């Protein structure tokens, strides 16, 4: 039976997954990065917890959550990415792959696909427009559209239970995802980008309304917080407004 590394190498050589080769190379097979991910998430995720991974892509965070002993529901709308997740976690009863886009409603969702760089495929037309006008995004092209199933955080909670942590990384659709949540959970994270700072503000407003009180920021792929301690929404909003465009992206963490 092939081990995990054998599955990854087989996926890399599959012609149908050529567009995901760069992601597979970067996100899998680096023990130092995996150890840093585990250390970073350990205060947020414990053995036996339920985690919702919204926008699981090729599953580096999913793999970390499993190493920490969590049960994971991975939500991913791109068929090829969902295929990768199923291959990597075949036979693992603690992983459920939901092939859908998470948003405000459970109806069908139109997904804008970047075939050359599937990491930035998105359900947000506004994100595509913003990228087309931003420095550093000139080479990105969303060359296809597909209709995918839709779900909401409330629907996932109703089916799978209340999660200890939710990770949201959906390329400019984070506000729609949070609009589909009607109750606080212990902790969550959402991605922000410097081409859509107003979206981060809307997400922080939504989380504050839901009862979240402490916030933190991690820039880029760093496994640590840019600001010490947990801050107010106003402090984090001010920080994000001042982050240079070149920072590109990061994640905001929130706890209730």
Image: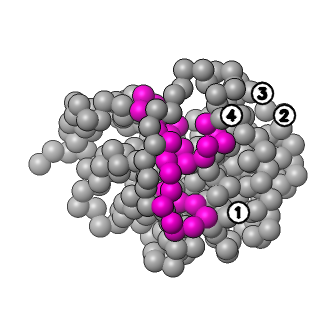
**Residue placed under numbered mark 4 in the picture:** 130
Report the side of 143 relative to 223 (left or right): left
Question: Toward the viewer: 199 or 68?
Answer: 199
Give the mark toward the camera: 1 or 3. Answer: 3
Q: Residue 229: x, y in percent?
A: 77, 50
Question: Toward the viewer: 66 or 154?
Answer: 154
Report the side of 250 relative to 156 (left or right): right
Mark 1 Cα-neighbour bin, 10 Å: few <14, some 14–19, many ≥20: some
- Residue at 11 percent across and 48 percent down: it is 1
**Residue placed under numbered mark 2 in the picture:** 242
SS class, disc 2: helix
Confirm whether residue 204 shows in the render: yes
The Cα atoms of the two marked residues, 4 and 3, are separated by 16 Å
Q: Is residue 113 magenta?
A: yes
Q: Residue 156: x, y in percent?
A: 50, 71
Q: Is residue 48 magenta?
A: no
Of marks 4 and 2, which one's residue comes earlier in the chain?
Answer: 4
CB atoms of marks 4 and 2 within 8 Å: no
- Residue at 61 percent across and 43 percent down: it is 125
- Magenta residues (range): 101-128
**Residue placed under numbered mark 1 in the picture:** 255
Q: Residue 13: x, y in percent?
A: 22, 30
Give the mark toward the camera: 4 or 1. Answer: 4
Confirm whether residue 76 shows in the render: no
The Cα atoms of the two marked residues, 4 and 1, are separated by 29 Å
Colour mode of the rendering = one colour
Of marks 1 and 2, which one's residue comes earlier in the chain?
Answer: 2
The Cα atoms of the two marked residues, 1 and 3, are separated by 26 Å
């Amino acid at each position: 039976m092939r081990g995990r590394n054998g599955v990854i190498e087989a996926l890399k050589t599959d012609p149908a997954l050529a567009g995901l080769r760069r992601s597979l190379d970067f996100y899998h097979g680096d023990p130092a990065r995996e150890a840093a991910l585990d250390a970073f998430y350990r205060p947020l995720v414990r053995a036996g917890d339920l985690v919702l991974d919204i926008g699981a892509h090729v599953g580096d965070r999913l793999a970390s959550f499993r190493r920490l002993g969590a049960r994971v529901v991975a939500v991913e709308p791109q068929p090829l990415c969902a295929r990768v997740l199923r291959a990597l976690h075949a036979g693992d009863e603690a992983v459920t792959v939901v092939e859908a886009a998470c948003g405000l409603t459970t109806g069908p969702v139109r997904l804008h696909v970047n075939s050359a760089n599937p990491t930035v495929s998105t359900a947000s037309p506004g994100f595509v427009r913003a990228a087309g006008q931003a420095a550093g995004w000139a080479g990105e092209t969303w060359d296809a559209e597909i209709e995918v199933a839709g779900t909401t955080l409330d629907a996932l909670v109703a089916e799978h239970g209340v999660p200890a942590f939710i990770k949201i990384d959906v390329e400019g659709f984070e506000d729609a995802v949070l609009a589909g949540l009607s109750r606080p959970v212990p902790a969550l994270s959402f991605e922000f980008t410097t081409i859509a700072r107003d979206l981060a503000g809307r997400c922080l407003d939504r989380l504050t309304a839901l009862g979240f009180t402490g916030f933190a920021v991690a820039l880029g792929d760093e496994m640590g917080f840019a600001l010490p301690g947990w801050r107010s929404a106003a402090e984090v909003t001010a920080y994000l407004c001042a982050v240079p465009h070149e920072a590109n992206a990061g994640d905001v963490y929130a706890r209730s």
